[in-house]
Each structure stands twice: as structure tokens, then as C-alpha cells.
Image (cartoon, helix red, strand yellow):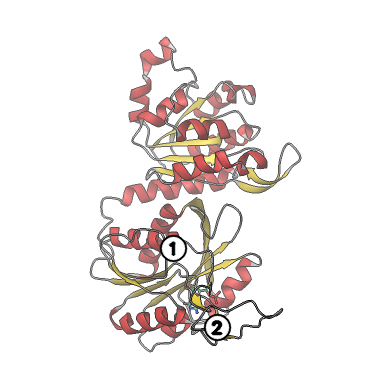
Amino acid sequence: MSVVKNKNIIVGVCGGIAAYKSAELVRLLIKQGAQVQVVMTHSGKEFVTPLTFQALSGREVRSALFDLDAEAGMGHIELARWTDLILIAPATANAIAKIAHGMADDLLTTLCLATKAPLLIAPAMNQQMWRNEATQENIKCLSRRRAVSFCGPAEGEQACGDIGPGRMEEPDSLLNSCLSLLSSAAKTDYKKQRLKGKCVLITAGPTIEDIDPVRFLSNRSSGKMGYAITEAALNEGADVILVSGPSALNAPENAELFLVRSAQQMHDKVMNLIDSVDIFIATAAVADYRPVKKFDTKIKKNTDQLTIELVKNPDILTDVAALPNKPVSIGFAAETNDVESYALDKLQRKNLDMIAANKVGETQGFEADNNELHLYWRTGLDKKTGIKSKKLAYASKKQLAEQLIDEIVLLFVK
Ligand code: C5P
């Protein structure tokens, strides 16, 4: 039975050309047995008529905050309590900005403010509007809220002729996000215990390879993904050890924290602790190389050219996954291109149980608050075949961490 069956869902339709796709989305939700109440903004009605949505949902479309007749039926506060999920598709930059700032100047934004239900936002806008710092600030601000998730936007050709991020996700992908959101909400009751008695070791952040007392080699990793996974594992009752490179973040209180600087230190600490570990999640962006020699004093610029010789660092994940009693070993692969093929190569080569791959881009990957993950795992002993995969749609790292832990529990924890 679909998790959507008999669920009450508000579909908010704002003013964007993608509004026509929301008609299909409403049809899919109804087909799965949901009760759908469509709420349109005034500009939404410029793109698709309320009649279309009324015919598909079997309910009169709501739009005005001060509609005496509609309010006499189910007032806006009752509607906010009635719903199990608010899905805004398409969500314009304007609607996102209003919700981020707690504004409530129409029915849809008022419902968002008045509900305890989760909010799923499917942004749709011109790529420049999406990239605008103001929009990105609003997305960041919403991503930090527990009950808010994002699906999309996708990249590609836009109605205005531009190419870039800002296309609304397709209805079937939005439906999948609804399903996963509602099913994780349904699990909340028995959650927090599924990793009880298990020890999870997580590496996070960058490593720093010193060149001299003032210079070093490092990378852009912030530690956000690893710290969010730490939090999610703690919420499931795990004993969590966090081995972290330098990060500006505060470590989750209940994790056992070991701060390290270099890849070698991270390697030594992990190998020291690994015996009691059931699940190892390597999110750290470990420097592949370190200078052969660390200078004791600051290098002076008295030559035109300077060569720093580098030597390869140990691969922590490979070493853990090669242990005779290896824990469930999960790696990350951040790539700028050919994400899938590099990820699958790492899955095999490092003998992993799962790899979480993501593309490093302007709004995702290193330093960003949001990400999109593709999980790949093996279903059999044959290393070449039997690969399964799952996409965790663009969302905050906090939400992705919860989904990742969910998948790990389902696949690897008896
Ligand atoms: O080989 P690559 O660095 O791309 O692999 C990435 C994965 O391996 C990540 O999970 C990372 O934490 C882990 N890794 C490691 N030790 C290294 C390099 C990478 O644990 N020296």
C-alpha cells in the first residue's frame, strides 16, 4: 500500500510556467490514494486555471486568505492542521523568500507558517534568479529548518531560453520525494533506536598537510556532511565516534570526538579505534598527498621557482575495508564529472559496501548546505554485476544524512 494512501496533502501552486506539470503531479497523488487540496497563489492562476486542478483533485481550489465562503467550510488554521504535507510545486523565488522570512500575506504562505506538517519545496525559476545570492540565502535559511525539504531544481533548458539550474523536478520525481518524506515521518516513532548497541565511526572535514609553519595544503571540505551524519546516527541511538579534521562547526554533543590535522593522523586514529566499530562512514576529504618534507622555518621567496615534492597519503577507507573483520564500509565520492563511473570504480577498488556519490557544483558539494547523493551498493558477491542504486534528491545535508542513515539501517543492520 502506498504511504500516500489516505494522506492529506496540500499542493501549493505558484506562478511559474512549470505549473502545468503540477496537474500531472496532482493526478499521480490522487491515483496513489491521497486527498489533495490545491492552493494556488494569484500568479499561479495566471498559468493554469483553478478548474483544471479542481477537476483533477475533486476539491475546489483555495486561493484567497479572506474568502468568507471557503473559510466557513475549513478555515485556514483547520486546513493547516488537516494536512500531512505541504508540497509547493512550482515554488517561485518570491514564495521561497516569503516563507524563509516567515511572511504570511496570502493563503499558501499562511498555511506554511501555521502548520506542523513537513514542507516540501520544488523550486522553479530562471537560472539567474536561482543563482542570485538572495535566493541562495533564503534556501540556506530554509534548509536549516527541520521540517523543510527541497526537491530540485533540475538543470537544463529553461522556458526563457536560458540553460542552467532552475527547472522544476518532474512529477514522478516529486512523487518519490513525497513518498520518502512521508515514510520517514511514519518511522519517527520507532526511529532513534535502530542503531542502539552499534558503534559508528565517521571521518569528517578536510585534512591539512603542512608545508612550513605558515603554509599548508588542504581542500574546501567544511565537515557539514560528516557532522550531519554524526547527528543522524546519534538520533538512531548509535555510539558515534567522530574523527574530524579542522572544521568551524561545533561537533554534536554526544559524539566521542577526536580532532586531527593531517591524513596520517586521521589514519592512525581510525586504525586505532576500528576494532570495536560496526559501521565506518568515510566522509572526510582526505588529502591525497603530503609534502615529503615539512620545513621548520618559513620558506623564503628567494628563488623564481619552487618545487615541493609530494608523497601519497595512506588511504584510510581502503585500509579499513581490507581488514579481515571489516565493518560495514561506506565511502563518499565527490566528483566534478563522470560521477557514476568514478563512484563505481571506487566501490569495487576499495571493496566498499556502499558509495555515496555527488557532483561538486556551485550550489552543492563542498561548503554548501545542500547536496544531492547517488547511492550505489552491491547486491551479490560478483564484483562486476548486481549493483543497485538510489538517488537522494537535492536537499539539505541534514535531511540527506537522515536518509542515508535510513538506507544503511535498512540494508546493513539486522
Ligand atoms: O579515492 P578518493 O579520495 O576519491 O575516495 C574518496 C573516499 O575515500 C572518501 O570516502 C574518503 O573519505 C576516503 N578516503 C580515505 N583516505 C584517503 C583518501 C580518501 O579514507 N587517503
Would you say residue 218 is visible in this rendering?
yes
**Type of amino acid under label 2:** Pro
Residue to which mark 2 is pinned: 291
Q: Quadrant of residue 256?
A: bottom left
Q: Relative to residue 197, is residue 315 depicted above or below?
A: below
Tell me which residue sits at (59%, 77%) in the image: 345
Would you say residue 414 is visible in this rendering?
no
SS of the residue at dot 2?
A: strand
Residue 348 rendering spot, x and y as whole percentages: 54, 80
Residue 207 rendering spot, x and y as whole percentages: 47, 73
Tell me which residue sits at (37%, 25%) in the image: 79
Residue furthest to the right in view is 161
Q: Quadrant of residue 357?
A: bottom right
**Type of amino acid under label 1:** Gly
Q: Relative to residue 323, is residue 162 depicted above or below?
A: above
Q: Relative to residue 310, is residue 193 depicted above or below?
A: above
Residue to which mark 1 is pinned: 223
Q: Check disc 2: other Cα within 10 Å, few if <14, some if 14-19, many if 20+.
A: some
Mark 1 residue's CB less than 8 Å from ligand 1: no
Residue 3 rendering spot, x and y as whole percentages: 40, 46
| Image quarter of the C terminus | bottom left
Residue furthest to the top in view is 68
Tell me which residue sits at (47%, 61%) in the image: 222
In this picture, residue 209 sits left or right of residue 129: left
**Real-space Cα separation, disc 2 to disc 1, in angstroms:** 23 Å
